[in-house]
Image (cartoon, rainbow, N blue to C red):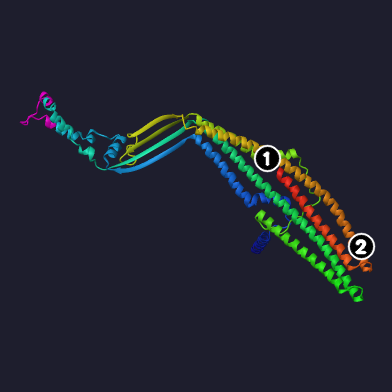
Amino acid sequence: MVSKMIWALLLLIASAYGKSESDTAKGYTNLPLKKALRLANRQNIEIDIAEFDRQIARLGVKVARGYNFGKLDATVMGLRSNDAGNVFGFKLQSREATFGDFGFDQFLSGFGEAMMNPDGTMADFQTFAQNFGNPQAQQQLLDTMPDRLNYPDARDHYDVKVRYMLPLYTGFKLTNYRRIADDMAKMARLDKQKIEAQKSFEVRKTYYDISLLDKFEHDLSVIKGNIEHLRDATLDFMKEGYAKKTDLMEVESKLSNVDRMLFEARANRELSYDFLSFLLDHKVASIKHVSLDTFDCKIPLANVLKRNRDIKKANLGYKIQDEMVDVTKSAFQPEVGAFVEYGSSDDTFLGHFQDHDRYTLGVQAKMNLFSGGSDYYKLQQEKLKRLKVKRQVELARKGITLKYKKITTEIANADKQVESLKKELELAETIYQNYQERYKEGLASINDVVIKQSNQIQKLLNLLKVQNLRNQKILEVYRLAY
């Protein structure tokens, strides 16, 4: 009994998992706008790329801060040489040099011969002084070429050292570079936020496009149904001899025209769904429609100027350029640095480390006294760039202000047009229905009915166009402010 329950539970889990996989493959269904906006922020590829740029900029801040802590290097070197200078230097660095390395064995041999009398007996010091004072004996001794010094045996040399270098004063160059790195990270964050706002704009616009296309398709379907009723009535009139074949052809032509518009609307809707799937990086099968009439924008200009990211980026760019001026000024300041080095050398790796260790401490100060005026002109360049960026900030504010006023004016005009076109469409529908009834009563021609129906469709298209323009302009205001 228990085994049967376990098998039933496993089958239930498998079926649920299969259903979940199937739903995922089909894509999101009845997706609300708010959830789509959240998904876009998490899944959109362009936003992901912007996030990488933001993280790279944040690491740049850590790189700039790291320069303040100096640099610690460890060097391990292994050498083998029979070069006289190298071998002697190796021994000195290893603290193992001897007088024998200078050839004193040969010097002492000559010195001993000078101490011997011609009869083989040892001379006293006075006799030696007289002999050594002989220029010929002295020159012969000095001309001796020590073999151990000039032709040493090959020697291994292992050197291990650690060096730490620390900048003490750089004219605030490192401080300003760190500030610039911080501001560049803020700039990358603003870039990401701007892309997020752009993707939000595109998602919202796609939602309104799809909702508008669905409403348009619904209205066209109603019109198509009316034309089909008119076609049926025309066929009945033809049977009774009250209508001609040309009347039927006119109606079918108009029906074909409506079918074409329906096909275009559905194709554009499918394309909009493809674009939305691209934005979310996941297939979207259907959405939850948004209201087309309640959509509005009442964001004051002051809020737009305060929140607009282009203005924020311009202000941040001015701050960065001001810091670049300070960086350039550091060329007129001295640079002071300190270093300490500790190491040991031997003919074996890490052999006698403490016996052969060494250290070096040092401080260095340098200052550029003359560079042909290039530092001065670089400073003037950066100051001019700062003035340029300041003007760009003013331009950004004035440009956004002008754009806001232009968009809000277009929205107000579109509102009036929508209000007027809705009344015109309502009138056109009423006139069409009236002419359709008059046609059935034989008081109007089929041509009159088709003309009134064409006028109805035209009014619907005009309304669709203006509503789409209005929604797009409202979304542009949101994009300016968020």
- Mark 2 lies on a secondary structure that is helix
Does residue 173 appear to the left or right of 301 in the view shown? left
Q: Is residue 148 above or below residue 452?
A: above
Between marks 1 and 2 in the image, the one whose residue lies nearer the viewer: 1
Q: Is residue 274 magenta?
A: no
Q: Nearer the viewer, residue 143 or 395?
A: 395
- Mark 1 lies on a secondary structure that is helix
The part of the chain drawn in magenta is 112-129
Question: Which numbered disc, 1 or 2, marks the residue that appears first in the sequence?
Answer: 1
Q: Nearer the viewer, residue 340 or 453?
A: 453
- Using the rendered view, name the quadrant where residue 7 is placed: bottom right
Q: Is residue 350 above or below residue 458?
A: above
Image position, residue 124 (x, y; %): 10, 25
Q: Residues within 10 Å of mark 2 (few under 14, many from 20)?
A: some
Q: Do the residues bearing badges 1 and 2 touch, measured as CB atoms within 8 Å?
A: no
**What residue did someone put label 1 on?**
396
Q: Residues within 10 Å of mark 1 (few under 14, many from 20)?
A: many
Residue at the image point whose x is 86% and y is 65% from the top:
450
Residue at the image point whose x is 71% and y is 41% from the top:
400
User: Residue 178 shows which numbered tag?
Assistant: none
Q: Tell me, yes or no, if residue 2 can be seen here.
A: no
Image position, residue 21 (x, y; %): 66, 60
Kind of residue sitting beneath label 2: Asn
Q: Tell me, yes or no, if residue 53 can be seen here.
A: yes
**What residue did someone put label 2 on?**
434
Q: Quadrant of the N terminus?
A: bottom right
- Using the rendered view, name the quadrant where residue 265 is placed: bottom right
